[in-house]
Each structure stands twice: as structure tokens, then as C-alpha cells.
């Protein structure tokens, strides 16, 4: 059921944003970029990006890396409305749409020349799952806009989890939080429905990979990466 009282949604968003900021300040956060710094350094880069984050992990990256140049794709469902209120309270834009519908609603706004932002954050398994399964909508958006997709892995050390479809993660105060940013992935322009699946599988594999790296890093305190050009691995200090 939709929450129709916009004042209640706004109040919930401001309250949630305050709690989230306090929680982030308490965490021991570390980042690793498999490619260029596309988070804090994104404004210096020529490309526009779609940041791909599992629905269960959207909150903390939004607090840490959000800014006025970033819009977040929000569903019209009740949970999307509350999250949208939180996003708005942090100064970011909202684009109402759904990756399960091909992203058509979002694309109409993304291609407008008068937008105040240049990058987009998407939960590719939202708004209703299946959990951690990339939908074709993010590929459609990338194909129509020319924006590159950045898979983002998020890991917490033994977080609390809600009983929702996505098992929404809430990190414990003062615990480890780890973020692994994949190499930006380009998608061919003008793809139609039949041509989306190949790139969907490619993004699925990258999402699985960076999230496995981030979760293992958070659990053990060591980031283990494959050594370049070999089948061996090397560790980076926590």
C-alpha cells in the first residue's frame, strides 16, 4: 500500500537520513577500485555512470557517496517512497521507475537535457526481486543513454538483516564496512529486448564477483584479489 501523506514520508526520510549518517560515521569503512575512482572522483571523469547496487545495500553507499550530481531510481512501491524521502533529504534527485519494466519511465527523464544531475544509482534486482538477480532494465537504460555501468560490491561484518524479500542489511555500529567498485562496463547502443540478455548475464557475473570480494573482505579484514595474468591471488591489508 502506498503512503499518501507526503509530510509523513518526508519526516521519515529526514529521520532515516540522520540515523544513517550517524551509523556511517561509526563504521570502519574502506574502499577498493578495480578501475578508476568513480566515486568521489567521478566528476573529473568524462563518462556518466550508472552505479549498480543490490537493493539490500543501497542505504550506506547513498550516504557515503551521494551528491547533487546523482539521481536514484526509486520504485513507486511503499518501501521506495520511504527510501525516496531519505534520498531527497540527502540532496539527491529521484527518478521514479522500475528495472523490472525495462526502465522506460526512467529513460524518459534520463534523456532530457535539462536534468541537474549526470549519474544514476540503480538497484538492478529491485523493487521486488528475485534477490540478487539482475533485471534487464539496467541494461536497457545503459543502452539508451550511453552511460557505463559500475558494479558495486558492499560487505558488512555480520550485519543485522530484516525479514524482507531482499534481506535488507543494516551494519552494526563500529563494525567493518567494505566497498569494491568494479571496472565501468559499456553496453552497445540501441539494444532491443532480444539483445539485452547477453549483457544482463555479463553484469550479473560482475555483481556476483565484486559482492563476493567485498563480503569476504568485511568478514576477514583481508581483501584477496586475483593476481594480474595468473590464477594466483594476493592479499591487501585491511
Image (cartoon, rainbow, N blue to C red):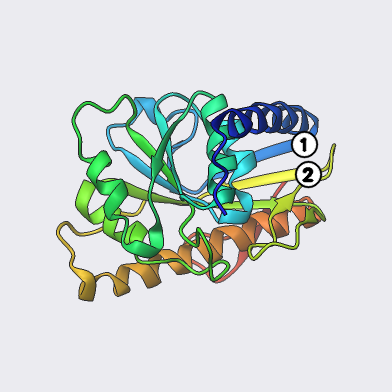
Q: Give the alpha-carbon distance from disc 2 to disc 1, as whole Å.
A: 5 Å
Whether the residues at callouts 2 and 1 have beta carbons within 8 Å, the answer is yes
What secondary structure is marked by label 2? strand
- At x 58%, y 68%, the residue is 131
11 vs 4: above or below: above
- At x 80%, y 52%, the residue is 157
The circle drawn on residue 64 is none
Mark 2 surroundings within 10 Å by alpha-carbon count, few (fewer than 14), some (14 through 19), many (20 or more): many
Kindly indicate the quadrant of the structure image that contains residue 211.
Answer: bottom right
Foreground of the two, 6 or 79: 6
14 horizontally vs 87: left or right: right
Q: Which residue is mark 1?
A: 28
80 horizontally vs 101: left or right: right
What secondary structure is marked by label 1? strand
Query: In the image, residue 200 lies at what x, y percent?
Result: 36, 68
Foreground of the two, 145 or 166: 166
Query: In the image, residue 139 lies at what x, y percent?
Result: 31, 60
Q: Which residue is mark 2?
A: 176
Is residue 146 visible to the viewer in this orientation of the structure? no
Amino acid at each position: 500500500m502506498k503512503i499518501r501523506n507526503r509530510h509523513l514520508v518526508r519526516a521519515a526520510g529526514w529521520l532515516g537520513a540522520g540515523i544513517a549518517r550517524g551509523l556511517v560515521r561509526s563504521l570502519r569503512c574502506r574502499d577498493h577500485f578495480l578501475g578508476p575512482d568513480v566515486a568521489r572522483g567521478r566528476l573529473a571523469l568524462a563518462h556518466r555512470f550508472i552505479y549498480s547496487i543490490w537493493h539490500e545495500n543501497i542505504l550506506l553507499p547513498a550516504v557515503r557517496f551521494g551528491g547533487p550530481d546523482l539521481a536514484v531510481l526509486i520504485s513507486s512501491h511503499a518501501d521506495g517512497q520511504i527510501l525516496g524521502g531519505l534520498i531527497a533529504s540527502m540532496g539527491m534527485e529521484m527518478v521514479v521507475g522500475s528495472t523490472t519494466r525495462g526502465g522506460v519511465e526512467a529513460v524518459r527523464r534520463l534523456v532530457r537535457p535539462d536534468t541537474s544531475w549526470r549519474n544514476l544509482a540503480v538497484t538492478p534486482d529491485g523493487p521486488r526481486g528475485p534477490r540478487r538477480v539482475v533485471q534487464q532494465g539496467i541494461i536497457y537504460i545503459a543502452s539508451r543513454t550511453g552511460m557505463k555501468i559500475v558494479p558495486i560490491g558492499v560487505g558488512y561484518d555480520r550485519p543485522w538483516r530484516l525479514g524482507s524479500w531482499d534481506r535488507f542489511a543494516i551494519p552494526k555500529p563500529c563494525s567493518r564496512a567494505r566497498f569494491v567498485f568494479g571496472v565501468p562496463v559499456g553496453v552497445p547502443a540501441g539494444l532491443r529486448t532480444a539483445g539485452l540478455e547477453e549483457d544482463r548475464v555479463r553484469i550479473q557475473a560482475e555483481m556476483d564477483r565484486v559482492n563476493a570480494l567485498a563480503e569476504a573482505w568485511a568478514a576477514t579484514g583481508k581483501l584477496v584479489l586475483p593476481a594480474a595474468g595468473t590464477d594466483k591471488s594476493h592479499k591487501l591489508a585491511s
